[in-house]
Amino acid sequence: MTSPGDPEPKMADPPTRWYCNYCQDELKSFSVKCCKCPDFDLCLQCFSSGAEIGTHQRDDDYQIVDHALFEGSDWSVSEEYALLDGVETFGFGNWADAANHVGTKSQAEVTEHYNSTFILGNVGRVTIPDKLTSKVIDHTGPEEGPLSPSLSTTFTPVDITLADQSELGYMPHRDDFEREFDNDAETLVSHLAVTIEDDDLDISLKLAHVDIYTSRLKERLRRKKISRDYGLIVAACSSAKQKQAANKNKKQLSKHESDFREKLRPFSQFMTPRDQEELYENVQKEKRLRAKIKELLKYRRNGITKHEECAEYEAARFKREKRKESRKRLAEKAKGRVLSAKKEKEKLNKIESKEDTIKREKEREKEKEKERDKDDRELVEDEFKAIKSSPGFNFLSDREKKLCNSMKMRPARYITLKALIIKDHLLRKQGIPHKTRYPSNLDKAHRKRIFNYLTKSGWIKSS
């Protein structure tokens, strides 16, 4: 594209065409030049087949020639392809990355050659229109409307049922699977963040992670496009239905057969699936044959020599066994009646004896409790004999009585100290400064024992 004030660009001369001296095909990229024969070129196909013509021999010295795509240009075909691939990969304007992709040209040479050849040259005149129309679609909706109402898909959704969608985990209108190819690809960039402290090496490493993630996304999209274009999603649904139908029609295995197959599973690595199924069928067939032979031997032992006599024998055997079972059942019923009568008598005797023993035991326990109460009263009277007559004794619990008895402290004095300690604790808890004055003749060890007892009993909380 040029502005009205810019000079008119020069038209590029038509490129010189080179042809193979053997098959006369045009040499577009690489060719083989003979070092002995003047002006003798071969294409790669003729050279690989060992073509000989005139004075040229297949063992002559040769040189690989990379032809230029444009006349008067020092850019080879491989360099032109590398330049176009670099611009497509890194984007127009990223000339440093494009030059690194070419490898043999500097950044200035890459910029000048691309602009002069593909933008301002004949290629740009033919391919780039004079007026560029914007193809950007506004997908934003009104403020009160839904988000992006004009957003439309660029592909035709796959027509599958809801059951197939849930089974495959596929959402046709979004062209997404619940579990995508390389499902953990996002972990490469999920924790990336560019900070001020990053140096050039950190930024390069993070950009490399982004490039790897982009390549994985491209591969994911490529696989999705192939599966959608070639009908692989519908084929997967149909194959799953066929498998389900085959499993329904398949005979259900018994517990014995399933256990037998489980035992033979280690040998499946040495056989094909077909051979393995044949092995299972042959083993079951052998089992059925053995059972049939055993049955025939039983008939022969009973004097049966014809097939028609087997049915009569089985009917007679069934009637005989039925009579045996009925007799056995009657005998068991008679025996059960006799036993039930005996058991009822034994139960009555046991109930009477149990009632008598329970009464005797209750009487003994009552007598023992009376004796224990009498002993406890005597022990208590003997234990608290020193403080029993003191005032306030009846207001103490058993543990407090033992505490006062061990410290040889009168109950009234203990009650006073208890009230002082609890009052001091409550005032300290409320944040009120208070200094408790305990009796001067109070032993510190006694006060500590009382404090520990009140803490353990829950009267006060330890700070």
Image (cartoon, rainbow, N blue to C red):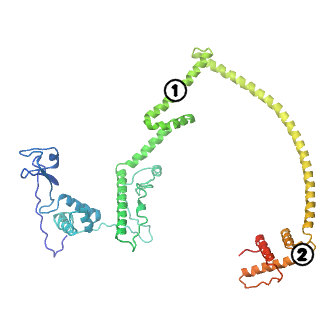
Q: Tag 1, which secondary structure?
A: helix
**Quarter containing the N terminus:** bottom left
Packing grade of label 2 (10 A; few <14, some 14-19, many >=20) is some
Secondary structure at badge 2 equals loop
Snapshot quadrant of residue 269: top left
| Of the image marks 2 and 1, the number of the one nearer the N terminus | 1
Look at 78% across and 70% down and name the residue there: 457
Question: How many circles with numbers are drawn on the protein?
Answer: 2
Direction from residue 203 to residue 61 in the image, left or right: left
In the image, what residue occupies the spot 55% across and 36% down?
A: 259
Looking at the image, residue 358 sits to the left or right of residue 75; the answer is: right
Q: Is residue 92 visible?
A: no
63 over 112 or under it: above or below: above
Crowd band around label 1 with a 10 angstrom C-alpha radius: few (<14), some (14–19), many (20+): few
Pointer 2 residue: 392
Q: Is residue 439 left or right of residue 2?
A: right
Instruction: Give residue 33's mark.
Output: none
Residue 384 spot, x, y in % from top left: 90, 69
Discs 2/1, front: 2
Q: Position of residue 119 (x, y in %)?
A: 20, 67
For the residue marked with disc 1, what is the amino acid? Glu
- Residue 219 lies left or right of residue 27; in this view the side is right
Closest to the observer: 436 or 325?
A: 436
Q: Horizontal and vertical percent for residue 342?
A: 85, 34
Nearer-the-camera pick, 170 or 280 = 280
Q: Position of residue 429 (x, y in %)?
A: 72, 79
Q: Where does the C terminus fall, quadrant-wise?
A: bottom right
Q: Which residue is under mark 1?
A: 286
